[in-house]
Amino acid sequence: MKNIGEILIYSLIKTFSLFFTGRKLRPPGIGIEAIDYVDLPRVLEMPVEVYMGRGLIGRLDCVVDANPPVSQIVWTKNERPLNLAAIKPRVYVDRRGSLVFRPADDVDDGRYACAAYSSLGAGHSSTTVRVYVRGDV
């Protein structure tokens, strides 16, 4: 095998939400070419159920692993798209994609899921989170 100063990378390893960048090395003075790992967004593990206090602020986080970055988070309730326009400003999606309830109410009981989108397209939806609103105001 002829040594031409190149390293072949067959796979990339992802750890601690950081991407290791594979690099093809060239002889000195020619430069380095970087290879970035890209993939559709992936929603990380979500709880099976969440209890929120009636009359208190509640939140559901949609933690996503994505490269390129997430451009949009879409939430569903009971397998239907959540119509935020009908319930704003009490329920909204914050800048991190979390669904915020200000305050949580009985009508918020249900099954929720989130899906993340990036410039590559739609990722897989999260598992369903069952939300229970309990307690006295």
Image (cartoon, rainbow, N blue to C red):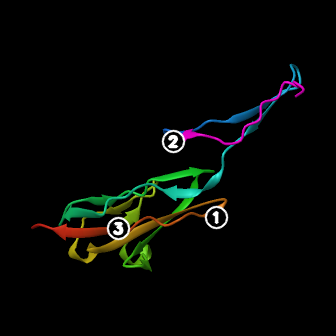
Verify CB contact (< 8 Å) between mark 1 and mark 3: no
Residue in the image at 41% along x and 68% along y:
113
- Give the CA distance from mark 1 to mark 3: 26 Å
Frontmost of labels 2 and 1 is 2
Frontmost of labels 3 and 2 is 2
- Amino acid type of the residue that numbered disc 1 sits on in the rendered structure: Gly
> What are the residue bounds of the magenta stretch?
1-14
- Disc 3 is placed on an element classified as strand
Indicate the position of residue 54 as horizontal and vertical percent values: 17, 67
Residue in the image at 63% along x and 51% along y:
68
**Quadrant of the image occupied by residue 13:** top right
The secondary structure that most of the magenta stretch takes on is: loop
- Disc 2 is placed on an element classified as loop
- Drawn side of residue 109 relative to residue 13, left or right: left
Q: Is residue 4 magenta?
A: yes
Q: Is residue 6 magenta?
A: yes
- Amino acid type of the residue that numbered disc 2 sits on in the rendered structure: Ser
The disc label shown at residue 12, or none? none
Q: Which residue sits furthest top?
A: 28
Q: Is residue 54 above or below residue 4?
A: below
Q: What is the quadrant of the N terminus in the image?
A: top right
Q: What is the quadrant of the C terminus in the image?
A: bottom left
Q: Which residue is mark 1?
A: 121
Residue in the image at 39% along x and 65% along y:
92
Frontmost of labels 1 and 3 is 1
Q: Which residue sits furthest left?
A: 136
Q: Which residue is mark 2?
A: 17
- Disc 1 is placed on an element classified as strand
Of labels 3 and 2, earlier in sequence is 2
